[in-house]
Image (tube, rainbow, N blue to C red):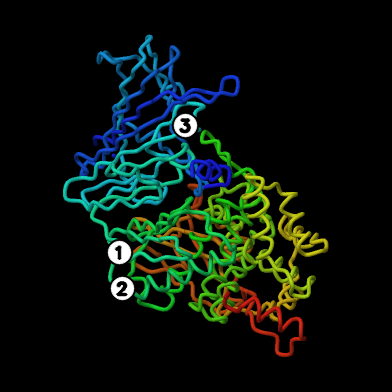
Amino acid sequence: MNNWIIAKLNKRSVGRAETLILICFSWLAFIRGLPIQAQQLAYTVRTPDPETHLYHVALACQNAKGSTLEFKMPVWTPGYYQLMKYASYVESFQAKDESGRLLPWEKSTPSTWKISTNGAKKLQISYDVRGSSSFVASNYLDANKAYISPTGLFLYLKDRLDLPVTVRLEPHKGWSSRIATGLDSIPGKQHTYRAPNFDVLYDSPILMGKIEELPPFEVKGIPHYFVGYNMGDFDRKKFTTDLQKIVANGSALIGDIPYKHYTFIAIGPGGGGIEHLNSTSISFSGNQLHTRAGELKMYNFLAHEYFHHYNVKRIRPQELGPFNYDQENRTNLLWVSEGFTVYYEYLIVERAGLMTPDELFQSLQQNIRAYENKPGHRFQSATQSSYETWEDGPFGRTGDEVNKTISYYNKGPILGLMLDFKIRHETQNKRSLDDVMRSLYRDYYQKKQRGFTEKEFRQTCEQIAGTSLTEVFEYAATVKDIDYPKYFAYGGLAIDTTARPLSGAWLGIKAATKGDSVVVAHVEYESPAWEAGLRSKTVILAVDGKPVSALQPLDLTRKPGETVALVVVQNGQRKELTLRTTEKYERDFKITPLPNPNALQAAILKSWLQPQE
């Protein structure tokens, strides 16, 4: 979670449904400078019949004040920048007074429950939540595991996100007594946890069930845990040793470990991960570690999610906390928060000795190719991609609109490398992007206890570099063509930007079967098919006079310059089209060390790659 939340921590030191018990104790606000107690909320979460995918909930509220109380469910979860329909999974909501009489309530908004107290001072509230989607941003419950994404489970009292919280969990019979979460446990109370406020609670996912824990390890005396469900067959000892190296190198980069404990929460096979304050939820299968490509992908993924507890949780744009859980929280700087984290995942794994320099170069090459060889880089900047992610999705739009977008996950790491090499070049290799990250951590998270503005981020970069960085920030905010050879040369690297023809002819159609039909699934922008007016969802009836169907695979094999006659149905109309194939040119962007670097270039490359002490 972000620095404004951590400050509070440091000062303190879908069938039946999920039931929570929320007990409101009153604290007193400050009156004439004298502190008096305020409210405290307590929840109990039960899983009486997990095969129904339903958690069971009861909520007790004491010292209620006012004629109405409003409880709200967030519409999104930090770390996943998409609106979620959490409230739609809530069922069987009811409220009672202390004598058990039902109290009237209404849904004043799709995510708000407004209760008329009728003067009652103690309320008993209950509701169920369905968990049927096994995803890191969703609740899930079955006979084998319970994964809780807290923003989709715990209602909060309107305007009181600051209230402290306790949570008591009741694992289903036959499950492990081990519960994986970043929440602090309450001594002497089994399966009971606390959070200083809802921001910390919402940033602390929970995994219960038939789960396994790998041997914990320490970095700088801080314990780290890896707990998961259905983790697969892999060398657990080697994996734990390698993960310790990743954490050690990631934390060494900043020079401070701000948490008391950290937990990797592996929810099972699948895709996706979300960073949290002192934990991360990840889809995980150890079977992936059997190949070099799979191992490298997993290590990069883990390094990415781990480093996020610095970059985005503590080193963060001001828009990303305090959060508004009722709407999108937009920022222009996800190319920094997400893109730089991709950049550092590569460096952390390489500096940990788990990736070769060539593999690092290939990873960066893939990022460049992913947006430079797609038309979106001509239409959308990295800052636009950041701001518009709530509509576009984290990897850009889909369908034909994919041609107008990029992903900050691809352009962001390259902008990070360019800033890094430029700073090293201008300072004679005395400073780097690492110094920028440490400065932001120290000045904004530790000292000012807030996020930074776009202006402050740029000022920090230019202060470390000792010069203007206008060109790099223009590359971030515009679709201006990037001078890759110039920036890569600063770091002693060459990059091949020559466009070369791909083998074979280019038509630009990707087809798929739908029922008995062959349908256009995707048309490449400005390809012969695109220029002829073909779009996705067009049905192809015949090619060169021969009927096609799901039982007769589509054959578009041609030589450059040859024609293809198509009969299609588009928007309900039958059409006959003649297309001429061409050659498609792409740039490879292969990255290699300069053959004859000067002294500064050689020094920069060496210090950039060398493992940290």
Image quarter hosting the C terminus: bottom right
The residue pinned by badge 2 equals 234
In this rendering, the count of numbered labels is 3
Q: Name the element at disc 3.
A: loop
- Residue located 61% across and 65% down the image: 527
Going 35% across and 63% down the picture, which residue do you hit?
Answer: 550
Q: Residue at x 48, y 26 (%)?
A: 158
| Residues at discs 2 and 1 in contact (Cβ within 8 Å) | yes
Local secondary structure at mark 1:
loop
Amino acid marked by disc 3 = Leu
Q: In the rendering, at what x and y percent does residue 3 appear?
A: 58, 46
* Picture quadrant of residue 70: top left
Examine the rendered structure and indicate whether residue 541 appears above or below residue 453. below
Q: Which residue is mark 1?
A: 231
Mark 1 or mark 3: whose residue is earlier in sequence: 3
Residue in front for this viewpoint, 29 or 426: 29
Vertical position of residue 319 compared to residue 209: above or below = above
Query: Label 3: which residue?
Result: 163
Please report the residue visible at 26 percent of the width from the left and 42 percent of the height from the top.
53
Residue 121, position in %: x, y? 36, 14
Question: Mark 2 to mark 3: distance in Å?
Answer: 43 Å
Q: What residue type is disc 1 on? A: Met
Identify which residue, 538 or 37, lies in the foreground.
Answer: 37
Q: Residue furthest bottom?
A: 596
In this rendering, position of residue 302 left or right of residue 347: left
Amino acid type shown at disc 2 = Phe
Left or right: 521 as drawn, with respect to 443: left
